[in-house]
Image: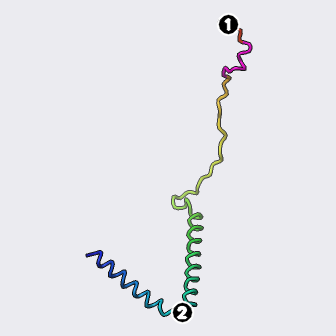
Amino acid sequence: MIKKKLIAVRDWMEDGLRSLLGRVTPDGRITIILIMLFVFSFGSIYMTVSSIYNMGKKSGQQMQIEHIKGVELEYQQKADSINHKNDFNYE
């Protein structure tokens, strides 16, 4: 039942668009396509830039950027093959 209504609405919209666009000349179609390209491109760029600009403003704080800290390594002198030269413990 709902599927039939959705199909009917889709067909009605498709027929309406075909009747509107059928009257447009090929030059008019190119003009419409170029206008839509510029409008959607501008909208996409605007949304991207405004999203980056407003990042973190809704939570009431700016994004905090921390510098990378150096890794603190433990320096322990472990026994390896070089340190055995003075070991005279022959067992």
> On the rendered image, what quadrant is the C terminus found in?
top right
Quick one: which residue is furthest to the top in this view?
A: 91
Q: How many marks?
A: 2
Residue drawn at 58 percent across, 75 percent down: 41
Residue under label 2, please give it: 25
Quick one: which residue is furthest to the right in this view?
A: 86
User: Who comes first in sequence, dot 2 or dot 1?
Assistant: 2
Residue 12, disc: none
Residue drawn at 39 percent across, 84 percent down: 13
- Where is residue 35? Give x, y as percent: 57, 83
- Where is residue 40? Give x, y as percent: 55, 76
Residue 53 colored in magenta in the image: no
Tell me the kind of residue under disc 1.
Answer: Tyr
Does dot 1 land on a helix, a strand or a loop?
loop
Range drawn in magenta: 78-86
Front position in the image: 77 or 14: 14
- Colour style of the rendered protein structure: rainbow
Q: Report the Cα–Cα distance between label 2 and label 1.
A: 102 Å
Residue under label 1, please give it: 90
Q: Quadrant of residue 10?
A: bottom left
- Where is residue 74? Give x, y as percent: 64, 29
